[in-house]
Amino acid sequence: MLSRSLFKGAPVEVSKAISAPSLRGQTVVLAASGGLDSCTITRWLTDQGASVVCCTLDLGQPDEEGFDTIKERLLKAGAAEVVILPAVDELLSAGMQVIQAQAWYEGRYWNTTGIARYVLVSAIVSFMKERGYTIFSHGATGRGNDQVRFQLAAAMLNPSITVYAPWRDPAFLSSFRGRAEMIEFCQSQGIPITASKDKPYSTDANILGLTHEAGILEFLETAPTAISPIMGVHATEAPNSPAQISITFKKGVPVAIDGEELPLRELFEKANRVAGQHGVGIAAHLVENRFVGIKSRGVYEAPGMELLGSCYGLLLELILDRRAREFFDVVSRQVAKQIYQGYWFDLATTMSLRALDPIAELANGTIAVTMYKGAVRYSRATGIENSLYDPEQSSMEAVGSFDHADSEGLLRVLGISARALAIAGQVRE
């Protein structure tokens, strides 16, 4: 569980938006990936007279070229210091909470980038507290969800922090209207960026999944297969033979794949690998409703989350009764929305997650599924200690203690209200 009490103190006044000239002589802590945006912001802020400390998080990025390379690039961009913060374990813990809540947003987006933002902010706010820094910066645009997540999370964890957002600063926008200007700027400064004007889309990655957006993906004529998968293959390129795999859960946490017990990180890595090989969770297209009020198009990769999340969902079918299922579905939607919209650290999320703890305690057993061309299908369930399913009770044969004739009384009682509706003229033909 991520820390929800990094800062305790009296409320502070909300600060007005700040501009770069006011940062001269001050230290700014920048959430930096080492990509085009963070390199541009680092160099530009340094030119404005600020001292930039870049914080890069190790989130198990599958597309990562190496943190030494990132550190070197950011230092060349003018960073006074580059700090690498380890956060894979924290992200996996948060990812498990997403799975246990079945908290995907709208279509089937597993909130992989959204949940990672809270891990990032938590780690950086802790670092800033240790160093005594008070100005936090990020490269999120003024049109997206990340700016909301960064700002709200930082405010909740430490209300004394000031957030500087370059993409909302007129001084920055007057120099950079988009990627083309940033690329030209970095090239003129000799910063070895990997971005180019010909790159067709952007990617954000961590161990839970990848988000592809912008560029050619902004046009609905572009099929999801236009991306080059990093965590697997397109379903059309997956093997022609199905493959079975089993996931064993203990108190809501996956502990083994095909009977092999593994630490959580190794288990996730294996789930990503085997599911990705079969096109599971690869190139999932979604036109979603951003919190800021516009629609955007994303293409997602999350093979391990899709595999483990699907197996957990199948397990829930066996252990939740009707009333518990209805309650779970409400909480699940609430948690998904909270993550997406920036409220992971607030009371509503805390309450929702705690409400699901009793369910996780009951989630024990093994679910086997078949993977084929991107699909995950139920195969079998074994060792489900708390399963409510009883084949004898549900059988259409003359077995079990449930007598078919017993339903006569039930239907007589239910029929009273049904007849009352008809008599009152409330039934529409």
Image (tube, grey):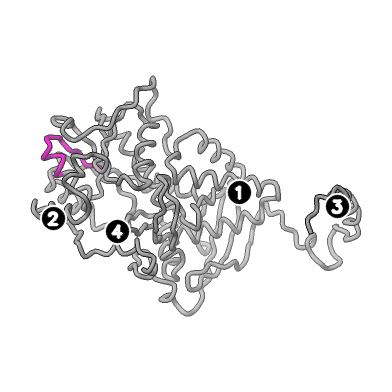
Gap between marks 3 and 4 measured at Cα:
59 Å
Residue to which mark 3 is pinned: 422
Looking at the image, which residue is at 31% across and 64% down? 216
Query: Which is more foreground, mark 3 or mark 4?
Result: 3
Looking at the image, which residue is at 23% across and 55% down? 66
User: What stretch of residues is rendered in magenta?
Assistant: 43-55
Q: Residue furthest top?
A: 10
Gap between marks 2 and 4 measured at Cα:
17 Å
Residue to which mark 2 is pinned: 184
User: What label does residue 353 carry, if any?
Assistant: none
Residue to which mark 4 is pinned: 202
The tag earlier along the polypeptide, 2 or 3, is 2
Q: Is residue 53 magenta?
A: yes
The kind of secondary structure element at disc 2 is helix
Gap between marks 4 and 1 measured at Cα:
33 Å
The tag earlier along the polypeptide, 4 or 1, is 4
The kind of secondary structure element at disc 4 is strand
Residue 42 is left or right of residue 334, and the answer is left
Residue type at mark 2: give it: Glu
Residue to which mark 1 is pinned: 329
Residue 216 is left or right of residue 98, and the answer is left
Gap between marks 2 and 1 measured at Cα:
49 Å
Query: Which is more foreground, mark 2 or mark 4?
Result: 2
Q: Is residue 408 magenta?
A: no
Residue type at mark 4: give it: Ser
Query: Which is more foreground, mark 1 or mark 3?
Result: 3
Query: Residue 312, image x and y in percent?
Result: 56, 56
